[in-house]
Image (cartoon, coloured by chain):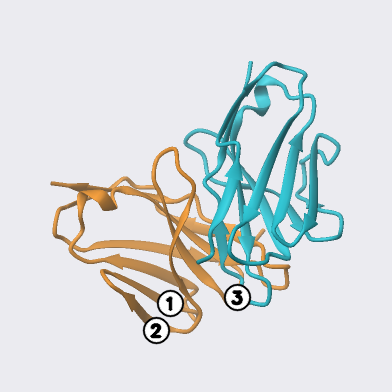
Chain colours: A orange, B cyan
Amino acid sequence: QKEVEQNSGPLSVPEGAIASLNCTYSDRVSQSFFWYRQYSGKSPELIMSIYSNGDKEDGRFTAQLNKASQYVSLLIRDSQPSDSATYLCAVNEGGSQGNLIFGKGTKLSVKP
Amino acid sequence: GAVVSQHPSRVICKSGTSVKIECRSLDFQATTMFWYRQFPKQSLMLMATSNEGSKATYEQGVEKDKFLINHASLTLSTLTVTSAHPEDSSFYICSAVVSGGTDTQYFGPGTRLTVL
């Protein structure tokens, strides 16, 4: 069974701090990794994709990928209350027609 | 770019009726679209993969005769919930992949179905 594991949280950080969200996956042949943000009652919104080992930065967000450890993370710098949401890690299912395996999500709460 | 719309955004129907939900890629062509369902406080559950011009691939446990999927064009996929019952009440979300692009899925805003 291919799995994507995330700590469900809630992860609480003060405004302005760095929020660190982690994800591990079981399928070694996965090549594409995504972070989505989902506000309560809304659909997921793509934050970042990452395909190569290392870091990828986009504004306040940095995704980190380590394929050897089967680990992907998302750092949010200067966290804002508006970042409070559930963050979903998704990994492509190797050999499939683009299917993504989603983690259950980590709920982040940024306190003013 | 990569905008996906869904219609309707919210629907309330009586038990036993059928409901059709449309998913459109507005500014790109999508050979493949996906249909998900999400119950309150639960994670996304993939229901089926929809490919333009061919039959949808359903996940285990999803009844293909109850959840009819038609992907008739490169910008439109429809999900019809037939003979809906209260247990079908959920948040239905579609996603689309840009034809010839990466495997990034772009999500529609979702349709909240309530069956009375």
Q: Nearer the viewer, mark 1 or mark 3?
A: 3
Q: Secondary structure at mark 1?
A: strand
Q: What is the chain identity of the residue bearing mark 1?
A: A
Q: Secondary structure at mark 2?
A: strand
Depth order, front residue of A70/B86: B86
- Point 67% across, 28% down: residue: B88
CA–CA distance in space, label 3 to label 2: 19 Å
**Which residue is denoted by mark 2 in the rendering?**
A54
A58 lies left or right of B94 = left
Q: Quadrant of the N terminus of chain A?
A: bottom right
Q: Residues within 10 Å of mark 1 (few under 14, many from 20)?
A: many
B80 lies left or right of A36 = right
Above or below residue A37? Residue B15 is above
- Point 21% across, 58% down: residue: A79
Specify the amino acid type for callout 1: Leu
The reply to the same-chain question for discs 3 and 2 is no
The reply to the same-chain question for discs 1 and 3 is no
Label for residue B102? 3
Q: Nearer the viewer, mark 3 or mark 2?
A: 3
Please report contact status of discs 2 and 1: CB closer than 8 Å, yes or no.
yes
In the rendering, at what x and y percent does residue B20 appear? 72, 35
CA–CA distance in space, label 2 to label 1: 5 Å
Above or below residue A68? Residue A77 is above
- Point 81% across, 53% down: residue: B56
Specify the amino acid type for callout 2: Gly
